[in-house]
């Protein structure tokens, strides 16, 4: 039998698994106990996939020792830049080690040495004993160790096969002749993650060229006379640092670890122990299959079975969620197809007798303005649901739905749906209006768990342990070959559609009870659900766009971009693709050598992000040109060119979609297209707003904007007398603040003082630090600290409020808005200062930003209600955080101004007055 040793680089695999699962939108990593399982599940899946697919004869998992290593003796700053371990990983480590031990796999480490050194040492010893060794890690550094019997083994990702690299693959990847030359490349290049300095100004590309030319670090320093310019200067000036970097990048092969072949033999796992651990973690499928011995060395059918009961050859993705689900195949249910007149009559009788009716529409697409109705499903009892397909033509659909109209108009009934706004818009197209109480399970879950995802499949799996039929099994994956639901067998559509209604009906009772228990039902009932109707009307209404104006603006931007491109290429002295971050980085940092320490991304590439380039402003004229180029390019592609394509062919207007369930603070989000992100700060950007116009000459755009609402909220929440007094006297809050913190009279406040005060006023809301404020207003850190200290001296109750918010969050785990909307802060007690700091800033900001969101939502509901009562022709069109935009009929202008101002300013009663600024014009820019 071939001797195959697998040495797993524990932390590299754990980090990789944790971030892969945490960033997977289809996976909720937090179990019912509030524990983030991403690191445990991801690592375990990786381990089990390896055991199933590779059948190692010998195996070990290698950890870094917690103490400093021998490298720190030579270079104390080694790895000084590394961020502290995320709390979720720290808390997962003991469990991961328990799992490894339950698999009867040895855990290895060596005091004073890293896992890399232990793996390298064992790999070389194993090679002498006739082993083939696979170093399982995504870390590139291990490439220096490969031989004909030692390989790098990168685990599979998202369905791809594992990558196995020997000498040929490593040499080809890095353009070298021998794998050990990778040490010299790493030594010259450096590593920002491990704080290996390298040679300043030498990146991966230059390091590779130098190794190709001179063989290694020693060869380079024997031929420095052949170098030229700044490269020669930097190489010669940093010789000691270069060789230190090579030492730090070298994996040591003399770690004091014995090679015990017997100890490393792969053993059968302790299934009872694994079952106990997996049950506690709620890994139901893992637990079940451990007991059924699905994880074994020799499958009885000769097929390499994976943890998930499928062939390993199918390469299941690492991020697969291992849980034990009920499905329609193993769960009793009664789903009924409704086609005949008598069946329809029976269905109407059933839903007429019900107090709560769950319904779901099946359509030809995701855009309710263009999609056609295919059918509608109903459920009034768990486990039983109905599906009624509709005819093909619009007129026939309208006719077929008429019999349901009186039921939907019944105000005594509760209508349940998942993402009900979509269904409302579909039904409106065919003349059906809902007057009853609505209950949206997606919004209910959002209020309960605002930081989670809210799609129905996930909710079903989480709360019902039921895995629904996937839409892709019916119509295929997205793309040109995807079918329409009209093309799917009617029996399959019935099963799918009725199941959706059934699941949603069952989720409603769970979420209703939770909302009541958590005292969140009032928020759901008085704000979020009434807002659904308001947003439905706004989305259906849309806003008119001046397409010709945007086309002219696009041509103007094209000419400006050409001029900027010429200037940039002239500065560069060569032709290159400005839109390529890689090529731009090479020009800025290698050709022009703008900075001695080129900033790099986590992957080691040169960074040319906007924040990086902004910090380099003034270093070279090319920087300003590049920033201007990017700004105009985005204006052209994202707005001037893209917005005309968003105009609906039927209505001639742009229709955004508002989401109530994306921002955890309670703010609305605008998508497809995002009309909350239309530029306003730059002169060129404002031209886009100019293209949003009134519907015709009988209307004008009215913009109404809350004035400094977040500052007024923090004054009210903190009960700071000084700040409250300033707002009640209608003083300019930034001038008033400047006068206080700089100890001058109001009339002595100059523009610079006011600007600094404005920055600290708004910065406080977001928990700004002295370092952050210093960067914002371009002062020293000590001056920024003095300004913040002076601010809190003048507004002491603001400081008390901030500290109190953090303290309360530490005790109860969440903060609340004025309408008791909650923001859960799992990391508020984290031992990781960076993670904890972010949670503390959220503890300060979430109640303020969330309260502002609550207030404008209440205002929207009240405005729309009165507009309906007065049967006005004017329409509410847009919400952009603190601003509302209306299409106002000229005859209703004064009435609307009074109505909007009253409802916005009196949406809630605070200790400070809310004030609204408004203006009307033919377009959005001039109105704002």
Image (cartoon, helix red, strand yellow):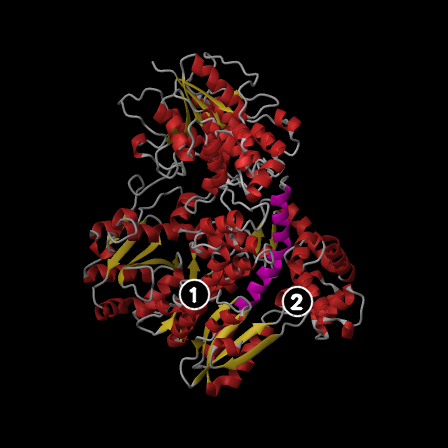
SS at badge 2: helix
Which residue does the numbered mark 2 point to in the structure image?
712
Q: Residues within 10 Å of mark 1 (few under 14, many from 20)?
A: few
- Quadrant housing the C terminus: bottom right
Q: Of 300 and 124, which appears nearest the observer?
A: 124
In the image, 489 versus 604, the foreground residue is: 604
Magenta: main secondary structure: helix
Q: How many marks?
A: 2
Residue 435 seen anywhere in this rendered image of the structure: no
Q: Is residue 895 above or below residue 503?
A: below
Disc nearest the viewer among 2 and 1: 1
- Residue 566 lies in quadrant: bottom left
Towards the viewer: 181 or 97: 181
Task: Answer with mark 2 or mark 1, whichever residue precedes in sequence.
Answer: 1
What x and y, as percent, mark residue 883? Answer: 54, 71
Res 563 visible: yes
Q: Position of residue 96 (x, y in %)?
A: 51, 29
Please tell me which residue lies in front, 569 or 794: 569
Q: Is residue 847 magenta?
A: yes
The spot of residue 155 in percent (x, y) is 41, 32
**Quadrant location, the N terminus:** top left
Q: Say if the magenta span includes residue 33.
A: no
| Residue at image point 73% right, 71% down | 750
- 28 to the left or right of 303: right
Region in magenta: 833-858
Other-residue count near label 2 (Cα within 10 Å), few / some / many at <14 / 14–19 / ≥20: many
- The residue carrying mark 1 is 562
Identify whether 542 is placed above or below 56. Answer: below
Percent from the top left, x then y, of residue 291?
39, 25
Contact? badges 2 and 1 (CB < 8 Å): no
Q: Residue at x 21, y 50 (%)?
A: 491
């Amino acid at each position: 039998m071939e001797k195959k040793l697998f040495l797993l680089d524990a932390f590299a695999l754990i980090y990789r698994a944790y971030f892969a699962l945490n960033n997977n939108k289809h996976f909720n990593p937090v179990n019912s106990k509030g524990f983030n399982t991403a690191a445990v599940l991801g690592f375990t899946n990786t381990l089990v996939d390896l055991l199933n697919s590779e059948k190692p004869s010998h195996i070990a998992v290698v950890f870094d020792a917690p103490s400093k290593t021998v490298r720190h003796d030579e270079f104390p700053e080694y790895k000084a830049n590394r961020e502290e371990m995320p709390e979720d990983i720290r808390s997962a480590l003991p469990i991961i080690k328990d799992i490894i031990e339950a698999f009867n796999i040895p855990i290895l480490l060596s005091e004073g040495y890293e896992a890399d050194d232990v793996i390298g040492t064992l790999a070389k010893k194993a090679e002498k004993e006739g082993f083939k060794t696979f170093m399982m890690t995504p870390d590139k550094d291990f490439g220096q160790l490969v031989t004909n019997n030692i390989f790098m083994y990168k685990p599979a990702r998202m369905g791809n096969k594992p990558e196995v690299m020997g000498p040929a693959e490593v040499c080809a990847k890095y353009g070298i002749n021998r794998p050990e030359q990778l040490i010299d490349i790493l030594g010259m290049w450096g590593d920002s993650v491990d704080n290996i300095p390298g040679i300043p100004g030498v990146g991966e590309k230059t390091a590779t060229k130098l190794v190709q030319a001179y063989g290694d670090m020693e060869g380079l320093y024997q031929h420095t006379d052949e170098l030229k310019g700044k490269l020669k200067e930097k190489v010669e000036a940093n010789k000691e640092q270069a060789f230190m970097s090579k030492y730090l990048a070298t994996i040591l092969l003399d770690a004091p670890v014995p090679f015990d072949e017997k100890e490393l033999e792969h053993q059968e796992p302790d299934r009872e122990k694994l079952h106990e651990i997996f049950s506690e973690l709620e890994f139901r499928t893992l637990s079940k299959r451990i007991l059924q011995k699905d994880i074994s060395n020799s499958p009885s059918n000769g097929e390499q079975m994976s943890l998930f009961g499928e062939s390993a050859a199918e390469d299941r993705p690492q991020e697969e969620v291992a849980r034990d689900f009920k499905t329609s195949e193993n769960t009793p249910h009664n789903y009924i197809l409704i086609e005949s007149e008598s069946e329809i009559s029976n269905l109407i009788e059933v839903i007429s007798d019900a107090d709560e009716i769950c319904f779901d529409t099946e359509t030809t697409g995701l855009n309710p303005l263009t999609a056609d109705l295919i059918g509608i499903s109903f459920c009034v009892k768990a486990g039983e649901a109905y599906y009624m397909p509709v005819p093909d033509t619009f007129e026939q659909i309208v006719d077929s739905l008429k019999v349901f109209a009186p039921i939907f108009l019944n105000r005594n009934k509760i209508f349940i749906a998942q993402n009900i706004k979509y269904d409302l818009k579909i039904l409106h197209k065919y003349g059906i209006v809902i007057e009853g109480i609505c209950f949206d399970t997606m919004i209910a879950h959002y209020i309960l768990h605002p930081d989670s995802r809210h799609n129905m499949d996930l909710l079903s799996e989480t709360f019902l342990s039921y895995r629904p039929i996937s839409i892709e099994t019916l119509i295929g994956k997205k793309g040109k070959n995807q079918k329409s639901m009209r093309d799917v067998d009617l029996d399959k559509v019935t099963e799918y559609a009725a199941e959706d209604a059934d699941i949603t009906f069952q989720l409603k009772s769970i979420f209703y009870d939770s909302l009541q228990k958590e005292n969140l039902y009032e928020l759901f009932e008085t704000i979020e659900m009434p807002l659904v109707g308001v947003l439905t009307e706004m989305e259906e209404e849309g806003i008119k766009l001046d397409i010709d104006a945007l086309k002219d603006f696009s041509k103007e931007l094209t000419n400006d971009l050409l001029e900027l491109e010429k200037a940039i290429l002239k500065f560069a002295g060569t032709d290159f693709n400005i839109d390529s971050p890689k090529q731009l980085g090479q020009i800025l940092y290698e050709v022009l050598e703008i900075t001695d320490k080129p900033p790099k991304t986590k992957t080691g590439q040169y960074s040319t992000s906007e924040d990086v380039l902004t910090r380099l402003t003034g270093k070279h004229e090319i920087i300003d040109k590049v920033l201007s180029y990017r700004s105009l390019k985005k204006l052209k592609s994202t707005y001037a060119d893209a917005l005309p394509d968003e105009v609906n062919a039927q209505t001639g207007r742009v229709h955004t979609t508002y989401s109530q369930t994306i921002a955890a603070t309670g703010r609305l989000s605008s998508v497809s297209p995002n009309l909350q992100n239309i530029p306003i700060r730059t002169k060129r950007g404002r031209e886009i707003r100019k293209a949003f116009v009134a519907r015709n000459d009988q209307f004008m755009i009215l913009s109404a904007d809350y004035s400094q609402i977040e500052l007024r909220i923090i004054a009210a929440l903190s009960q700071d007398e000084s700040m409250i007094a300033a707002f009640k006297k209608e003083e300019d809050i930034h001038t008033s603040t400047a006068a206080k913190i700089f100890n001058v009279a109001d009339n002595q406040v100059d523009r610079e003082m006011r600007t600094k005060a404005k920055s600290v006023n708004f910065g406080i809301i977001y928990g700004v630090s002295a370092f952050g404020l210093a960067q914002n207003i371009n002062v020293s850190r000590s001056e920024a600290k003095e300004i913040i200290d002076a601010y809190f001296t003048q507004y002491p109750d603001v400081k008390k409020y901030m500290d109190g918010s953090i303290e309360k969050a530490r005790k109860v785990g969440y903060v609340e808005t004025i309408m008791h909307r909650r923001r859960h802060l799992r990391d508020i007690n984290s031992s990781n200062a960076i993670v904890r700091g972010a949670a503390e800033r959220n503890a300060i900001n979430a109640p303020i930003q969330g309260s502002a969101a609550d207030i404008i939502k209440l205002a929207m509901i009240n405005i729309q209600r009165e507009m309906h009562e007065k049967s006005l022709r004017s329409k509410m069109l847009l919400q952009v955080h603190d601003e509302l935009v209306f299409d106002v009929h000229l005859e209703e202008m004064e009435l609307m101004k009074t109505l909007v101002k009253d409802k916005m300013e009196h949406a809630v009663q605070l200790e400070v007055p809310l004030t609204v600024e408004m203006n009307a014009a033919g377009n959005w820019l001039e109105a704002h």
